[in-house]
Image (spheres, grey):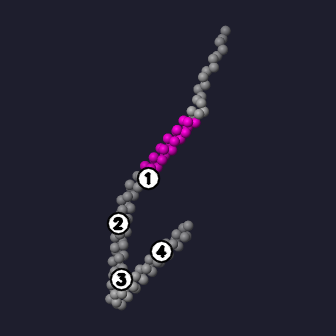
Amino acid sequence: MLKPAEPTPSPERPIGELVQELVDEGKAYARAELDLGKAIAASKARALALPAGLFVAALFVGMAALNALALGVVLALAHLMGPLLGAIVGMLIFAAIAGGLAWFGLERLRGAL
């Protein structure tokens, strides 16, 4: 006669164990994604360091050129109308240019938003 089959142990693991494994794998995946993001950001920051420094240097040299131009304008006006009045007129000219640029930038910003 045949013996009754013994119940085989179920290959399924308990739900708690599966959930814990899922949580652990999710944490590991999130950490890996975060590390990847950090590595990409660090790589881009290193790549942008030299160009950013060059742009800052160009800004300082450009400011020196603008100062030289302003001094030339003031000296030319001082020759025509005196030093104090030449300085005031030169200041008004460059203040008007700066105000115009600021107004234009503000209008473009408002248009973009």
Within-10-Å neighbours for mark 2: few <14, some 14–19, many 20+: few
x and y, in percent, of residue 1 in the image: 67, 9
**Residue type, numbered disc 3:** Val
Question: Which residue is labeled 3 in the image?
Answer: 73
**Residue type, numbered disc 2:** Ala
The part of the chain drawn in magenta is: 19-41
Say which element carries label 4: helix
Within-10-Å neighbours for mark 1: few <14, some 14–19, many 20+: few
Mark 2 and mark 4 lie on one chain; the one further toward the N terminus is: 2
Mark 1 and mark 2 lie on one chain; the one further toward the N terminus is: 1
For residue 78, say whether it is visible. Answer: no
Please, is residue 13 above or below residue 89 in the view? above
How far apart marks 1 and 3 lie (CA) works out to 46 Å
Question: Which residue is labeled 4 in the image?
Answer: 102
Mark 1 and mark 3 lie on one chain; the one further toward the N terminus is: 1
Q: Is residue 83 left or right of residue 2?
A: left
**Which mark is drawn over residue 41?**
1
| Residue 61 figure quarter | bottom left
How far apart marks 4 and 1 lie (CA) works out to 32 Å
How far apart marks 1 and 2 lie (CA) works out to 24 Å
Mark 2 and mark 3 lie on one chain; the one further toward the N terminus is: 2
For residue 91, say whether it is visible. Answer: yes
Q: Is residue 104 left or right of residue 9?
A: left
Q: Quadrant of the C terminus?
A: bottom right
| Residue 55 figure quarter | bottom left
Identified at 36% across, 62% down, the residue is: 53
113, 31: nearer the viewer:
31
Circles 2 and 3: CB distance less than 8 Å? no
**Which mark is drawn over residue 57?**
2
**Residue type, numbered disc 4:** Ala
